[in-house]
Amino acid sequence: MLADAIRAEGYRLTKNRTALLWSTLFVPVMSIVFGALGAFFLKSSQARIEVDSKMPPQVLEMLSSAPINVAQAVVDAAAKLDGPPLLLFVLIGAATLYAGDYRWETWRLISARNSRTNLLLGKLVVVGLLILAAQVLLLVGGLVEVLIRGTILARPLVFEATGQMVGQFFSVAAISWLGAIQFTMIGMLAAVLTRSLLAGLFVPIVIGVATALSPQLLAGAGIEPDSWLAVLVNPGSAIDALKAAVSHNPGAPPLPDGLLPKAIVSLALWLLAPLAAALALFQRQDLSKE
């Protein structure tokens, strides 16, 4: 049963404390450390910064005495829950789950106890929960960083949330979670195709960099960034478009006509195609020696 596969994969992941800690705790801790160091630097350089006419207004705003809206900081953090730091480190746990049985040659021991579809889907569900845990901890780390920044810069903290902000937070956080899932599912397909842990780690990174560079490459060929081809080959732009559609930020430029359905189709393809390919390949693999 699928529930048995999920419980088994979750139990095995909790025993791999190294992968678990790197995937969930490293990025939040580093965000707190660098945030505190940045606040200390701003405080120590405040006199010089305030007289510099070329200083960006965002930096001057950080040094102002205006209160920090913690609720708005949380909403802003939701858009960064699928940022490169989290994706890179959560990939450690995801690749370990997807390729671990190939590395330790344990597939033949567990494949007789459940269907192959359930075994692979169980890994996917646990990776989804791992990503969720990493994102929750990153939000907690962001809150701690805001508290430290407010203390160091002597800025009062307020919590002013509206119903629209709550809806925006959950919508953007859900899209960020799907974006992280999409990134790790490339690792699933790579792990099944190559039976290699390293492929599960590095193939998503290479493809992620290639898709991020695709707008510049396509622009050189005269292809508009909101065309079907440009959006389909770049899931990152599709995710950004979906976030912009649910954010309703005042002053933000409107989305180009027709971009939203293109973004939905692009993200759906990048989610479903690797899953379908991995399941199809896995069903036909010889696991007698794995």
Image (tube, rainbow, N blue to C red):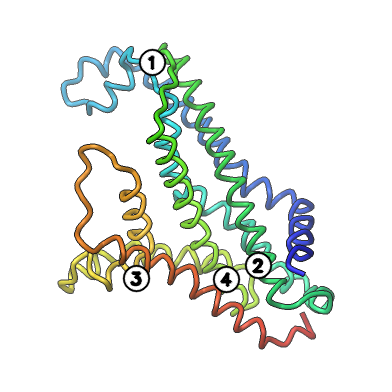
Residue placed under numbered mark 4 in the picture: 199
Assess disc 1: are there few (<14), some (14-19) or many (≥20) residues with their C-alpha within 10 Å of its C-alpha. few
Quarter of image, res 260: bottom left
Assess disc 4: are there few (<14), some (14-19) or many (≥20) residues with their C-alpha within 10 Å of its C-alpha. many
The kind of residue on which mark 3 rests is Val
- Badge nearest the viewer, 4 or 1: 4
Quarter of image, res 66: top left
Assess disc 2: are there few (<14), some (14-19) or many (≥20) residues with their C-alpha within 10 Å of its C-alpha. many
Q: Which residue is located at x 79 percent, y 85 percent?
A: 288
On residue 44, which mark appears? 1
The local secondary structure at tag 4 comes to: helix
Q: How many marks?
A: 4
The local secondary structure at tag 1 comes to: helix
Q: Does the CB distance between marks 4 and 1 fall below 8 Å?
A: no
The local secondary structure at tag 2 comes to: helix
The kind of residue on which mark 1 rests is Ser
On screen, 64 above or below 183? above
Q: CA distance from mark 2 to mark 1?
A: 47 Å
Q: Quadrant of the C terminus?
A: bottom right
The kind of residue on which mark 2 rests is Tyr
